[in-house]
Image: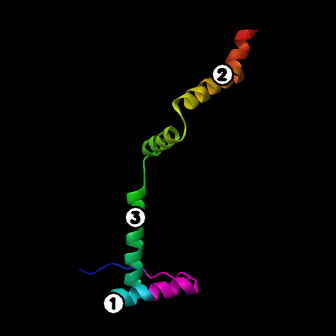
Amino acid sequence: MARTSVKSTYSLDVETVRKLDHLAAEWHVAKSEALRRAIELAAQNHAATMRSPLQAFEELQKRVKARFTKRQIESWAVETRRERIASSTRQRWRKT
């Protein structure tokens, strides 16, 4: 099946061109095919490492729990809550 292609021009540094030449020779393909394969591999790798915001948040929580004691976390939460209440415009309105 024929592949539709688009001719494009890119500027690459010398080291990148050397790496592309090496890959093309190692894979026994043209440089354009080596570039297609490298981009496909990069895209697959990127997709595999992407996390949803919820997954990233859960990972952050695990790291925090592993680094701090439960008492330190609870103390931080109490202190943060006090600071939020103290800086709240609603709290200032209630005091007057």
Name the residue located 61 percent from the left edge and 23 percent from the top edge: 78
**Viewer-nearest residue: 90 or 51:** 51
Q: Is residue 95 left or right of residue 41?
A: right
Q: Is residue 56 left or right of residue 91?
A: left
Residue type at mark 1 is His
Residue type at mark 3 is Asn
Return the x and y of residue 96 as percentages of the image width and height. Answer: 76, 9
Secondary structure of residue under mark 3: helix
Q: Which residue is mark 2?
A: 82
Q: Is residue 70 left or right of residue 79?
A: left
Image mark for residue 58: none
Residue type at mark 2 is Arg
- In the image, residue 80 sits, relative to residue 37, either above or below, namely above
What is the span of residues highlighted in magenta in the rendered image?
Answer: 6-21
- In the image, residue 67 sits, relative to residue 20, either above or below, namely above
Q: Which residue is mark 1?
A: 28
**Dot 3 surroundings within 10 Å: few (below 14), some, or many (20 or more)?**
few
70 inside magenta stretch: no
**Viewer-nearest residue: 43 or 56:** 56
**Viewer-nearest residue: 78 or 49:** 78
Secondary structure of residue under mark 2: helix
Image quarter (top left, top right, bottom left or bottom right) of the N terminus: bottom left
- In the image, residue 56 sits, relative to residue 10, either above or below, namely above
Q: CA distance from mark 3 to mark 2?
A: 44 Å
Return the x and y of residue 23 as percentages of the image width and height. Answer: 41, 85
Q: Which residue is mark 3?
A: 45
**Viewer-nearest residue: 51 or 62:** 62
Q: Are marks 1 and 3 in contact (CB under 8 Å)?
A: no
11 inside magenta stretch: yes
